[in-house]
Image: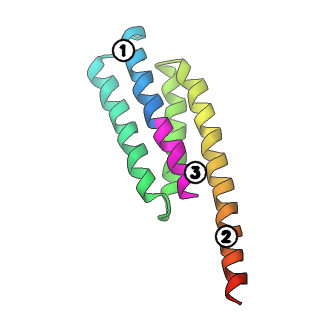
Amino acid sequence: MRTLCSSTLIGEALVVLFAALVAMQLTDVSHGALWTVSGIAMVLCVLLCGMITRPGAVAVGWALQLGLIASGFVVPTMFVLGAIFAGLWWCSVHYGRRIDEIKAARTAAAAV
């Protein structure tokens, strides 16, 4: 699960960076506010990579996804990008847990 979720979060941090660069040219939002919000989102993505196995990290990841979708009110493209990354986040969490369960079952069967 850690690998899948971390890959999604790193990709998301890069997309937020590129979206911020585009938003600077397309919106009337102040550059300081834009970079502050984008920077917080990028730092949160990177921090979550290391904390993904801790309790509550998946919930924080979902909050991040909802925040990025909501940023579509400022940069409309983020509605689509946020929805795509929310789908990737769901897949990473869902399939990552299933893979971890299969590995644990194989390890338990091998130990017997």
In primary-sequence order, the first of circles 1 and 3 is: 3
82 over 8 or under it: above or below = above
**Above or below — where is 23 with respect to 16?**
above
Residue at the location (31% across, 26% down)? 35
Outermost residue, bottom direction? 112
Is 89 placed left or right of 39 in the picture?
A: right
Residue 96 sits in quarter: bottom right
Query: Residue at (60%, 39%) from the top-left corner?
Result: 86
Q: Quadrant of residue 82?
A: top right
Q: Residues within 10 Å of mark 3 (few under 14, many from 20)?
A: some
Residue 105, position as x, y percentages in the image: 71, 76
Quadrant of the rendering where the N terminus is positioned: bottom right
Q: Which region of the structure is painted magenta?
A: 1-12
Identify residue for label 3.
4
Task: Tell me which amino acid carries mark 3.
Answer: Leu
First in residue order: circle 3 vs circle 2 = 3
Instruction: Judge from the rendering whether residue 23 lies leftward or rightward of residue 105; answer left or right.
Output: left
Task: Tell me the element at label 2.
Answer: helix
Q: What's the mark number on residue 82? A: none
Q: Earlier in the sequence, mark 1 or mark 2?
A: 1
Q: Is residue 23 left or right of residue 76?
A: left
Viewer-nearest residue: 98 or 26: 98
Q: Nearer the viewer, mark 1 or mark 2?
A: 2
Q: Position of residue 73 (x, y in %)?
A: 51, 21
Q: In the drawing, what numbered circle is on residue 24?
A: 1
Placement of 98 over or under 18, stated as above or below: below
Residue 7 inside the magenta-drawn segment? yes
- Give the residue at mark 2: 103
